[in-house]
């Protein structure tokens, strides 16, 4: 969608397409409200893949992605966490990339952490940031609205649209991610993604049915709950 006035270029991409229905829907709703008459620059949308180029792997769409991202000011990839997790809204990026950090700030991300899947910068030529929220394969109005609002804030910050920039009082770069293992049985989470917890605070209960053999799962460190099992399945961690 190209505006009538010159300006920045932003690409937004849902690599898993319909497997991340909230993200694809957010991009579709963003597309439907954009008007070239009120825009400067351009917005490119990839609603149905392809998968992203991971560093060190062969990639059949390299020429196409290199062509569309060359000269762009930002590339935002939208995804839910790996199944069966449900995640709090956060961004993942190369925290040493100043341009990517600026994109993350413009999205209004409260929490950021180093990306565990570095993208090939020989293919992706624009500053890339992952927007991660909600649950894969599940449609959620709250997730749709948050993703669309984050992209709107980015476009407004860059001057592509008139959307107001996002105001975030506290931004946190998460330097360490701690996995909490469970020993088995049904897991009942009492914390929610995005909750701030203190070390030793109960975050879940696990064990066989009943109260006698139930075990309290406590936070091993103080921090934010990034993700929890979406399904209360035996042995979930």
Image: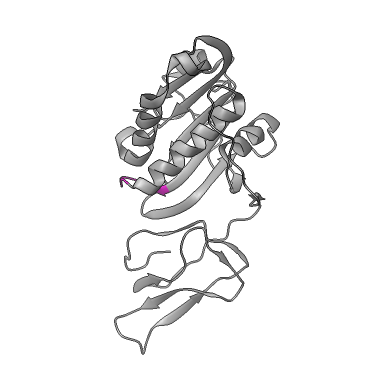
Q: Residue at x 38, y 64 (%)?
A: 236
The residue range painted magenta reads: 134-139
How many numbered circles does the render carry?
A: 0
Residue 213 figure quarter: bottom left
Does residue 236 appear to the left or right of 101 in the view shown?
A: left
Q: Residue at x 31, y 80 (%)?
A: 208
Q: Quadrant of the C terminus?
A: bottom left
Query: Of residues 103 and 32, which is closer to you in this image?
Result: 32
Query: Of residues 219 and 140, which is closer to you in this image?
Result: 140
Query: Of residues 37 and 178, which is closer to you in this image?
Result: 37
Q: Quadrant of the N terminus?
A: top left
User: Residue 216, how many percent across, how many down?
Assistant: 46, 79
User: Residue 69, how many percent across, how many down?
Assistant: 53, 18
Magenta stretch encompasses residue 96: no
In the rendered view, would you say 228 is above or below 81? Answer: below
User: Residue 231, how many percent across, how many down?
Assistant: 32, 61
On the question of residue 115 being in view, the answer is no
Residue 52 figure quarter: top left
SS assignment for the magenta stretch, majority:
loop
User: Residue 111, how many percent across, how many down?
Assistant: 59, 49
Residue 44 figure quarter: top left
Q: Residue at x 60, y 25 (%)?
A: 158
On the question of residue 223 being in view, the answer is yes
Does residue 149 appear to the left or right of 94 in the view shown?
A: left
In the rendered view, would you say 46 is above or below 115? Answer: above
Does residue 136 appear to the left or right of 76 in the view shown?
A: left
């Amino acid at each position: 969608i190209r505006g009538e006035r010159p300006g920045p270029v932003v690409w937004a991409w849902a690599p898993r397409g319909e497997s991340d229905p909230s993200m694809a829907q957010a991009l579709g709703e963003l597309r439907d409200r954009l008007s070239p008459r009120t825009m400067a620059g351009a917005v490119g949308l990839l609603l149905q893949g392809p998968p992203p180029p991971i560093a060190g792997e062969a990639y059949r769409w390299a020429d196409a992605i290199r062509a569309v991202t060359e000269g762009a000011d930002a590339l935002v990839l939208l995804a839910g966490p790996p199944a069966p997790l449900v995640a709090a809204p956060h961004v993942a990026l190369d925290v040493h990339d100043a341009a990517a950090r600026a994109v993350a700030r413009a999205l209004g991300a409260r929490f950021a952490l180093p990306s565990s899947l570095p993208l090939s910068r020989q293919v992706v030529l624009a500053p890339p940031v992952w927007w991660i929220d909600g649950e894969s394969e599940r449609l959620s109005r709250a997730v749709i609205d948050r993703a669309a609002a984050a992209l709107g804030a980015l476009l407004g910050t860059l001057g592509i649209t008139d959307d107001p920039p996002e105001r975030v009082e506290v931004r946190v770069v998460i330097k360490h991610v701690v996995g909490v293992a469970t020993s088995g049985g049904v897991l009942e989470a009492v914390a929610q993604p995005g909750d701030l917890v203190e070390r030793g605070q109960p975050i879940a209960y696990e064990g066989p049915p009943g109260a006698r053999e139930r075990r309290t799962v406590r936070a091993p460190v103080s921090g934010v709950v990034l993700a929890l099992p979406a399904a209360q399945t035996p042995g979930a961690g």
